Image (cartoon, rainbow, N blue to C red):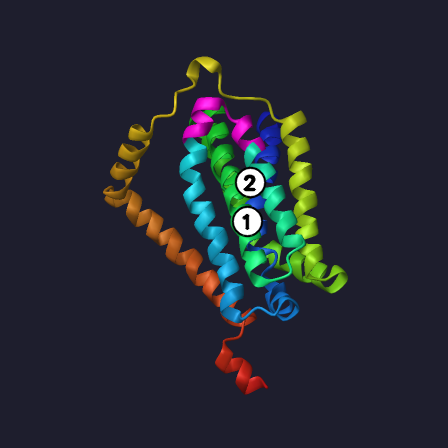
């Protein structure tokens, strides 16, 4: 990758990796978290569902917002929301509080999943845009492998709360990266006002687009298989727990 692409690729890649790390980094600690908070295996699995539900819904807000207000304002709001959710997780004392924190985390992490892609579209076209998007997707591909390893290491050193402490530090550093290293890429003349009707019509078109749905379900089922395998290995069912006891 050329020098002109390396810097934005690094910045956008670092911003984009916060979300995947938030998904996978605490998975090795789920049994320890459940034991510490007195949460059932089903309750711990809810913490994952809460994140994904918020992450999926909030993307529909950040996209139009980024087209209306520019790219940095939604990113600031998303990272701020992620910081708040991480603090709630860090100081959670029950499974419900942890799930609530994860939901808020997901609301913030959605901005980091959507807006960097829009920045790529603003800055590059053609082969350069393809290379940039490939670099960002490489981060997404590597993160599910590295995040659990990092989480396991932190679990052994700091306990499970240290994992959320590390995510908090990463989020604060990403705020500095956004403020001082990433310029605004959407010119005021190219901004579009938010229109709920346009948003709903766009969603309706996607939901009947067979090509979009096919690719979406392929990615969704593939990721679901990985998450299901990890949960099966790390979070015992009540029947398995009884047999072990």
What stretch of residues is rendered in magenta? 64-76
Residue closest to the eye, 229 or 30:
30
Q: Quadrant of the C terminus?
A: bottom right
Residue 111 x %, y %: 51, 37
Q: Residue at x 71, y 60 (%)?
A: 153
Q: Residue placed farthest to the right in the image?
A: 157
- Would you call the spot at circle 2 few (<14 residues within 10 Å), some (14-19), or many (20 or more)? many
Task: Give the alpha-carbon distance from disc 1 to disc 2, as whole Å.
Answer: 8 Å
Give coordinates of residue 133: x percent, y percent.
48, 36
- Quadrant of residue 75 in the image? top right
Asked whether disc 1 touches disc 2, contact meaning CB atoms under 8 Å apart, the reply is: yes
Residue 5: which disc? none
Q: Is residue 244 above or below residue 192?
A: below
Q: Which quadrant of the structure image shows residue 195?
A: top left
Q: Is the stretch drawn in magenta largely helix, strand or loop?
A: helix
Would residue 218 be visible to someone looking at this image?
yes
The picture places residue 154, in percent across and down from the top left corner, at 71, 58
Horizontally, residue 94 falls left or right of residue 122, namely right
Provide residue 55's location: percent of width, then percent of height.
47, 46
Q: Which mark is residue 20?
A: 1
The structure residue drawn at horizontal position 51% and vertical position 33%, both measured from the top left corner, is 116
The label number, if any, that marks residue 16 in the structure image: 2
Q: Quadrant of the N terminus?
A: top right
Taking the spot 46% from the left edge, 65% from the top edge, the residue there is 228
Q: Residue at x 59, y 65 (%)?
A: 30
């Amino acid at each position: 990758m050329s020098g002109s692409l390396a810097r934005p690729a690094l910045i956008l890649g670092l911003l984009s990796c916060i979300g995947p790390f938030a998904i996978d980094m605490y998975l090795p600690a789920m049994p320890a978290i459940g034991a510490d908070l007195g949460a059932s295996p089903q309750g711990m699995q809810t913490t994952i569902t809460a994140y994904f539900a918020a992450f999926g819904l909030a993307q529909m807000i950040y996209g139009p917002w980024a087209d209306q207000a520019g790219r940095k304002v939604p990113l600031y709001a998303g990272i701020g929301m992620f910081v708040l959710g991480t603090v709630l997780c860090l100081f959670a004392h029950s499974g419900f509080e942890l799930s609530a924190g994860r939901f808020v985390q997901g609301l913030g992490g959605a901005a980091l999943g959507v807006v960097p892609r829009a920045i790529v579209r603003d800055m590059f076209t053609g082969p350069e845009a393809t290379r940039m998007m490939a670099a960002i997707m490489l981060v997404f591909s590597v993160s599910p492998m590295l995040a659990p390893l990092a989480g396991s290491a932190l679990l052994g050193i700091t306990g499970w709360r240290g994992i959320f402490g590390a995510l908090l530090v990463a989020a604060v550093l990403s705020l500095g990266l956004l403020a001082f290293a990433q310029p605004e890429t959407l010119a005021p003349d190219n901004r579009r006002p938010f229109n709920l009707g346009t948003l709903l019509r766009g969603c309706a078109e996607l939901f009947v687009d067979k090509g979009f749905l096919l690719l979406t379900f392929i990615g969704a089922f593939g990721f679901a298989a990985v998450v299901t395998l990890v949960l099966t290995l790390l979070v015992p069912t009540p029947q398995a727990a009884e047999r072990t006891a």
